Image (spheres, coloured by chain):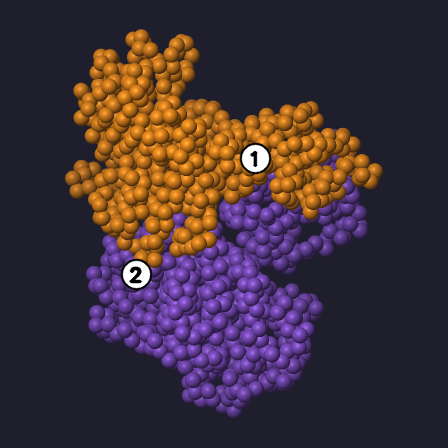
Amino acid sequence: MYNFTPRPSQQDILRYTGGRLGIAAVPGAGKTHILSALAAQIIHSGVLQDDQEVLIVTLVNSAVDNFEARIKRFFDNPIHALYKYRVRTLHGLAHDIVREKPASVGLENRFSIIDEREAAFIRRESVNAWLANHALDEYLDPSLDQSKMDWVKRDQLPNLLDSLALAFIRSSKDRLITPVSLRAKLDSSPTPLPLAELGYSIYADYQRALAYRGAVDFDDLIRLALTLLENDEEYLARLQYRYPFILEDEAQDSSLTQERILSLLSGGRVGRGDSRDRIEITTTGSNVASGLDTLATNARYSTSEVGGNWVRVGDPNQAIFETFTTASPELLRAFIQNNPSIDMPESGRSQPSILALANHLIDWVMTSHPISEARTALSVPHIVPVPEDDPQQNPPDDPEGIKFISKRYTPDEELEAVVKSVKGYVDSIWDFPDDDKPTIAILVPRNQRGVDVVNALRQKGIEPIELISSTSETRAAAGSLSHLLGYLADPSSARKLSKAYEVWRRDWREQRVENRGLENREVENSGVENRGEESREVESSGLEKGDLSTTQLLNYSSVLLRKVVDVENFVAPQNADDWRSAVGENEAEQVIQELSAFRVVIQRWLSAVTLPIDQLVLTLAQDVFTEAHDLALAHKLALVLRSAADDHADWRLPELTAELAVIAKNERKFIGFSDNDSGFDPERHRGRVVVTTMHKAKGLEWDRVYLMSVNNYDFPSAMPNDRFISEKWFVRSGLDLSAEALAQLTALGVGSPPSGTSRYAPPTNGGATRPPSNEYDFYEEGAATLRSRLDYVKERLRLFYVGITRAKRDLIVTWNSGRQGDATPSLAMSELMGWWESEGSNQ
Amino acid sequence: MLDLNLNQRQIIESPLDSKLFVSGPAGTGKTTAGVERMRHLLAQGVPGESILMLTPQRTLQEPYLDLLYSPERRAGGEVTPATVGGLARRMCDLFWPLAGEAAGFANPSEPPVFLTLETAQYYMAHLVRPLLDEGYFESVTIDRNRLYSQIIDNLNKAAVIGFNHTEIGSKLDLSYFGDPAQRRVYADAQDCANRFRQYCLAHNLLDFSLQLEIFANVLWKQDIVREYLTKNYRHLIYDNVEEDGPRAHDLLRAWTADFQSALLIYDEGAGFRYFLGADVQTGWALRELCDEYIQLQESFVMSESVAQLSERLVDAIVPNLESKVESQGSNDNSLSIIQSHFYPELLDAVVNEINSLISNSLISPSKIVILAPYLSDALRFSITHRLEAKNIPWRSHRPSRSLKDEPASHALITLAALAHPHWNIHPPKFDVAYALMQSIDGLDLVRAQLLTDIVYRHRDLQLSTFDQIKPDVQERITFSVGNRYSTLRNWIEEYRTSSILPLDHFLRKLFGEVLSQAGFGYHRNFDSVRVAASLVESVKKFRLALDLTGLQDLLGLGREYIQMLHDGVIAASYLEGWQNEDKDAVLVAPAHTFLMMNRPVTIQFWLDPGSSGWYERLSQPLTHPYVLSREWGEGRQWSDADDVQYSKEAMARLVSGLLHRCRERVYLGLSELGESGFEGRGELLRAFQKVL
């Protein structure tokens, strides 16, 4: 049995016996841990019937595995927990719900789900189709001259419309509006709403394209699941029985629709203080920190209550969004306010000075932010260090670990300064034992800035780790296959032939990598050409006499293959032995044997090229993979490519290879194999430098963290000089067209979204039912743009908070003057910097 | 002689004027008795042609056909193996003048055109496509071909169950309680069914539903037809009565009395074709027509422990209060579990186990099946590939590639497109290179691409000559390939200038004059020849169906066929002659397919027990097997409780049906992550959980 010592707030949570419970947790509070413990405790108590499960809902696949692993640790015999709990992402849950009764929502039994990349592809086609027949002139800045106007239409408008369409479609789906119902609303609208018309047109086209493929997107899954639950009471009752307890993690990221699904499943309504809710938190004074057994026997669960047992854990302060989302942290806040709640303020992650800094940010935002509407961006609880007996102690206090660099850098100077600092630091720790090396990260607001940082680091001889969420195994397997297909698509290329050879001998190659120790497999296998230096050494020094090591043989053969002039003479010579002249007559016997073995394989592959893509991939995989997980991935990739080929009848090997390369580079969200996809683990990269965005850093922690570009462009505060990314210079009156389009959607009276009319949420009352007509129902041009600014300002405050709380020991914050040279430090940075210098560091 | 029990002997040797109804669970020797009865009838001098052997589906006839085609059978009149549908078609053909007029066809004096599923789908596509643009079916998300096939399916159900096709929409609508936004699709589906029927009547087209309706409603009521049938068929053997629809049962109800002898065989645990309209109740009711009813109980197939496993599993799925099953642990060897983390590992383990069963336990491959609820092409390929690597013979209900995906037919279609520039199909270079590689003996992919890059112009389909290529490149490609290319190219060029042939004639000509000659790809490759022959056959059927209506422009026919092939309308086309595969082989098939083969085995491997495919009823947005059935009360709503109940019963039926066809052992293939990397946790697995 796993020994778990709950912290004080966790003890409170473990006294949960039923009903609704809202938990506000701080960064590093151990949310996953406590929910796993709670799930295990419920299972232990024996309250579950045969067909009942504790449902745990979380955000991403990697979290699913995390939960699975943790819950199992609470059981001596994992069989006892088998089928007693189910961990799902919200999309996974929605899929489960819909898959049981697809026909009821107009789906074919084996409907397919397109991923975000394919959805983006289809949406882009719809946008282009719209642009081919329409103009958006009434919204463009009339003062633009003709050539600039043409350039904008050609280069800028497609992207702008694409993000508008994304926001419009997602938001419509979150409000359960279909194109048909939207059309009806538009037809009866008294005023013309051109942006809503535009949105409708693209939405309708997009849905038609999906229907044609018999497919739905992720948002449809959520929408259809809710539709099903709302229309089928018996089915709902059955599911309510099946899931008597619902534990929800990362609840700040749920949208209203998602919240409604869980609310219905847990048998109640959202966000209202309900008399049936009960939680008895009795502080009996007895020492309950002795493990779960006592608790399990003491806890008396009730599964018969209709009110529903729903525990929501999240941190509203960490609600940050990279792209448009319909989620809103206000929903969780309202839930916590209206239901029994417990705070989880203890965190052992950061040293006290960093905690003080983060807490001050909360205080300043709540009380003193110059824009009073922005003061709800952050909320208490403050973060407190863990008690002294806690196994995970906060690092010792070190005010020196915090540095705000007030100096006004240009963007290039900022890069230079940070890289210099990183280099100095990395050099200073080079002789630490590997396990003692600290973890290091550079966090930036946007992807492009990350690319700059990576390049600057490389110039200084530092090979960074680019944070990617899927495992190297996925990418390595996909990368290998993409090299093979790449050769088959271009079989006369000697270079690709040689690459295919290296893939075939990938085991030898990996040994070499291990021997070298420093080689970064992730980069190497992700499709980046990265020929080892040894190849060149062998090439220049010629072949030594005597037996070759496998590494030497691999490199030598690979070089020989690269030099083949007419590849056909190697793979399909006219006479049986002619191929030897293609590679060189006088090679050692060992080399000849190696190459002839490879020829047999390559000939088989070449003859398999006319097979359907799935079968070609399986054939190749059988030859190059031995590991079970690689073979399993190959099988999955075969299915993915087959469906890509079915969807794009004109695709041949080059396009399919490109698709694989995309998977290899992880530009595509790859569902499945979550088991091996345990997420990014900073601990595996001690002593290396991780570069990523602040958004992607959520949930992670490093000993030393650099926050870059904390200026008023990336972190605006709605001050007079602030600029907003979503307000395009070529759009009339500085309108934020996405926000305006959503406001027009709302004006149609189709129900207000949880997040008002724009990207990020203004406070709502957390109403369970869709609010009836409200102030936003009258469309007034420009108002939504302003509200959207405010939401953006608030999201950026939370983003800064997230950035700060990634650091365990050292935190270095810098800013730059921006491309135009007129940016200033962000208001929050200035505030923290001033406070830190005057009093913070003395606390 | 077979080991037969008393009951079986009684059935087999009953008098030549007796009418028997035999029922019992699978594996009790019913079909064996049926086959022996047929042997007995023949041995008694009953002329073969006077025996009608009826089953609801052709695959169920396998054991009977084995007897009919066996060497011991001497020449003589042939027994007629048939399905009611097949009979309907023959009667429509034979008595067309009668049928045509009475059924309301526009041109009864013109010959009828019988539609296959594919050609029916083709016409349906033509009728429905413009309606989709008008907004029909907007609320459903469904692949177009499935949309068409579900409308056809509704028509077929109306015919099989026996209600007027104009009632489809209202029946579905009245029972509907789901999302109101979905409701209008039933009206759309009804409208499309009506249009299709009208189109058929206007153009002498007979799809399956019309054939059956004409036979049952029109022809059967004509004395001349009745007399014909009664005179020809004196003895009836009707197996798997329970898998037929009520309309077939109605027909037999009226007809049985006319036979001199009849043997009706009913499988008590079955009714697997419910989603095609099968009705166990109307089938069971036929018992009343027979003089004698014999029930077989004792299983020849299941070992004691398999029988127990079956009972316990069924009990776990549909708990039965009166059940006397003791909840004892598994102390038997009827169930083995093969476990793995990843899916391909599981396949390896399964194939290894099969290998050892064959070589160590000397179990014949034909006594082993690998079953799954669904078989993706990739899965089928993966399994059969592994079996081949171990030299284990295998067979599958169908190959892992449809005709469209077979390289040999793909190449032929590319060449056809090249030969018919007016089709305006421009194959990509890859396709042309593959076609050349496939067609020209000794041409490898590297040279094929080299050659294609030089000679083929995608824009206008131009194929330049080999002579125009630079000498050094000619040498790389080699002159022998060059000569063959020239032959093929010249043939295509010549054809382009001559008058156009129907696609199947074109393919035959291309094949005969070039590709089957020495030096070309189909000369020695018999697999390719088989594929080519199947393609020609498929094209021909398509042409005949369309040709006769006189509506189609002959020149566009080939293009149309290729379009249909690409769109998946002709998705069901597989190699002809596939069913003649080696029977002494491991069967790899979906579970339902195996059930419809009427053959017990010794060992079954069940893959994907965690899949929901064992449990979920065939979910189709435009049709519904239960609501359209005869028992469904008018206006009764289909509820979630029905959903659960019927699904569980269907799964229990499936599980019990499989186990009743299993002599010794079931292997459960359990991988933590399924084919697509997801964990499966379906109801079947839960049932096993309770049993273990």
Q: Which secondary structure lies at badge 2?
A: helix
Colour of chain B in the image = orange
Total numbered badges shown on the rendered structure:
2
- Residue at 53%, 72% in the rendered image: A694
- Residue A242 drawn above or below residue B596: below
Identify the amino acid type marked 2.
Glu
Residue B358 drawn at (x, y percent): 44, 26
Is A15 situated left or right of A61 in this image? left
Q: Give the chain letter for purple.
A: A
Chain bearing mark 2: A
Judging depth in this view, the residue of A489 and A841 nearest the camera is: A489
Identify the amino acid type marked 1.
Leu
Judging depth in this view, the residue of A291 and B127 nearest the camera is: B127
- Residue B374 drawn above or below residue A469: above
- Mark 1 or mark 2, which is nearer to you? 1
Chain bearing mark 1: B
Is B174 situated left or right of A570 in this image? left
Q: Which secondary structure lies at badge 1?
A: helix
Is B591 situated left or right of B263 in this image? right
- Residue A29 drawn above or below residue B39: below
How crowded is the residue under tag 1: few (<14 C-alpha within 10 Å), some, or many (20+)?
Answer: some
Location of mark 2 (residue): A230
* Label at residue B554: 1
Judging depth in this view, the residue of A362 and A235 nearest the camera is: A235
Residue A113 drawn at (x, y percent): 45, 54
